[in-house]
Image (cartoon, rainbow, N blue to C red):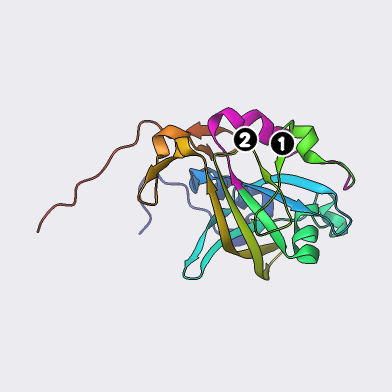
Amino acid sequence: MPKKNAFIFNTSDLSEQEMYKLMIGSVVPRPIAWVSSKSKDGVLNLAPFSFFTVASRNPPTLLISIGPGVNEREGSIKDTLTNIREVGEFVINMVSEPLGEAMQCSSASVEPEKNEFELAEVTPQPGGLVKVPAVLEAPIAFELKLDRIIPVGGDHLVLGKVVRVQIDAAAYAGNYKIAIDDWKPLASLAGDYAGIKPTFSIVQKDD
């Protein structure tokens, strides 16, 4: 029995864009993976993805979902996916509130030859265990080696094994914990963004 005063949508009745809008407005807030990659010719790329999560704790693996490029009808592929597939390495930089505008700049559709670090006016920092640079200004950066790419419809799930983590002193609380309130993570909503403040705990009740 449907809930009263509820809108019901069967996916078979919806277009791809209509269903997408329902999902991105409901599955919130989403963390932003600011992915730096490098082409086989050495051109740097930087792009944000909000379909992003932890895939496994052991081995430590992160997952991003990469959709089709701008020219969807032609089956185009985003530069990030091409670079990761060809080079096998990438970096996920975490986005803090002060980096919001730079992150947004890097989401623009530009030619593959364009260095998006320069477009976003951020600094490439050489990787430690990968040949792809991190964003120097990012509070946290995960260096990853490609594990696998899984096609799902028109999207691709990219799983990367974490080989190195860099954390700014201001974002580190010690004992392998992150000072979340200090680094001010930026979350993606349905076209808008939100900060996480203030955080709070929920106490487990005894039965």
Taking the spot 58% from the left edge, 33% from the top edge, the residue there is 192
Q: Position of residue 91 (x, y in %)?
A: 65, 53
Q: Secondary structure at mark 2?
A: loop
- The reply to whether callout 2 and callout 1 are in contact (CB within 8 Å) is yes
What type is the residue that disc 1 sits on?
Answer: Thr
Q: Does residue 95 show up magenta in the picture? A: yes
Whether residue 60 is situated above or below residue 126 in the rendered picture? below
Mark 2 or mark 1, earlier in chain? 1
Specify start and end residues of the magenta stretch as a single range. Answer: 93-112
Write down the residue under mark 2: 137
Question: Is 121 or 23 nearer to us in this picture?
Answer: 121
Q: Does residue 102 show up magenta in the picture? A: yes
Taking the spot 58% from the left edge, 45% from the top edge, the residue there is 32
- Locate the C terminus by quadrant: bottom left
Write down the residue under mark 1: 123
Q: Position of residue 177 (x, y in %)?
A: 38, 48
